[in-house]
Image: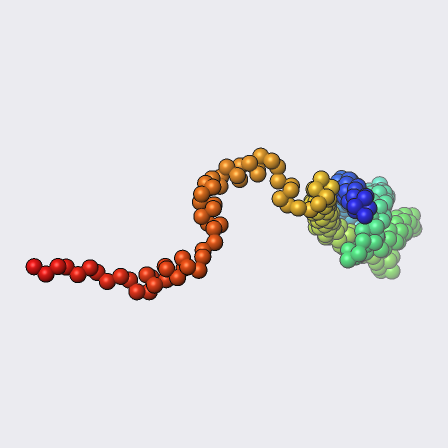
Amino acid sequence: MPLLKKIGRVLLIVIAVLVIILCLGGIAGAWWANSIAANATLQVFSVIDTGVNVVESGVERVNSLVAESRAEVQQAEETINTVSTNLQENSPVLTALSSRLQERLEPRVTNIQQTLAPVRDAVVQANSAVQLANSIPFMSRQFPVLVKLDAVFDTLGQLAADVRQLNDTLRATITAEKNELTQESTTVLTGITTRIDTRLGEVETRVQETAANIDDLQARSAALKSRLLLIYNLAALAATLLMIWLVYSQIVVVRQQWSRLRNPGGDPASALPASSSAAAADVLPAASASEVEAVAAPVTVSEAAGVLPEMIDPPAPASQPEP
């Protein structure tokens, strides 16, 4: 039976040591997982940050191109209204206007499309990162920028067609050899310029909305990134504290079982070292043999009877002799 107890205590010590080793490995693993999760999160949000930077620079360039294009279209409309009364005298003006629109307005529209192309690619990558972030519980985010950019590209396609129609109508008017523009031609030209200006305004509005959504996304992404990193750190810290508590409890188990292995009888007095016993003996005062015998000697009945009257009736004082 004592052998079985000894084996059981040894097994408890071995298990406790294994638990301690696993806990120490768990602490290292918790912080390693924290590092991996933090790096993955930073990589995801770096894609969003890169996309935001590309979109911001592209939106700024597009706004500049749209403003220049709208000024060009408005100036062309004013020129058409001015020269519409006398084509023969102002035919060179319309020719110059047609050339200017062909050299300036069409390339600007093309530049807008080319500038928005990398912006859309960056938005697609950012949208993928947002969808990946949405896979995290309680982290749902909306990113409607891609739909708005697709609408902008559709508008730009219609805008390019309107610009080509304006140039074709101007060239046809110049070669018609009329002394003045008819009201119908003037209405067609001004209608085209108004439509171009309206479409440019739509492009500008949607691009500005895209920029606002991008800024909002950047702010929310920064807050989400900070929150996720904080959650990772708190989880690793909680796991570390739990593992430390387990290590401490197993150390207590090891010490208890080891002490019982060294002292199988379980008598606390026997576990004291010899030096402690000697020190306790030196502290106690030495008693003589006579004191020990006096304490240990029994009291007889006669002695007790002789003592009791004296205690009850003390002797009277001796009378003094009369003079």
From this viewpoint, is residue 203 visible?
no
Q: Position of residue 135 (x, y in %)?
A: 83, 54
In this view, the residue in front, 303 or 253, is 303
**Quadrant of the drawing holding the C terminus:** bottom left
What colouring method underlies this structural image? Answer: rainbow
Total residue callouts: 0
Residue occupying image coordinates x 79% and y 46%: 2
Residue occupying image coordinates x 64% and y 42%: 270
In this view, the residue in front, 248 or 305, is 305
In this view, the residue in front, 237 or 315, is 315
Choose top left, top right, bottom left or bottom right for residue 122: top right
In this view, the residue in front, 138 or 130, is 138
Identity of the residue furthest to the top in this view: 275
From this viewpoint, is residue 257 visible?
yes
Residue occupying image coordinates x 64% and y 45%: 268
Is 70 placed above or below 262 here? below
Q: Position of residue 245 (x, y in %)?
A: 70, 47
Left or right: residue 113 versus residue 227 is: right
Choose top left, top right, bottom left or bottom right for residue 315: bottom left
Q: Position of residue 86 (x, y in %)?
A: 81, 52
Left or right: residue 271 versus residue 320 is: right
Left or right: residue 44 versus residue 302 is: right
Identity of the residue furthest to the left in this view: 323
Identity of the residue furthest to the bottom in this view: 313
Residue occupying image coordinates x 49% and y 50%: 296
Q: Position of residue 243 (x, y in %)?
A: 73, 46
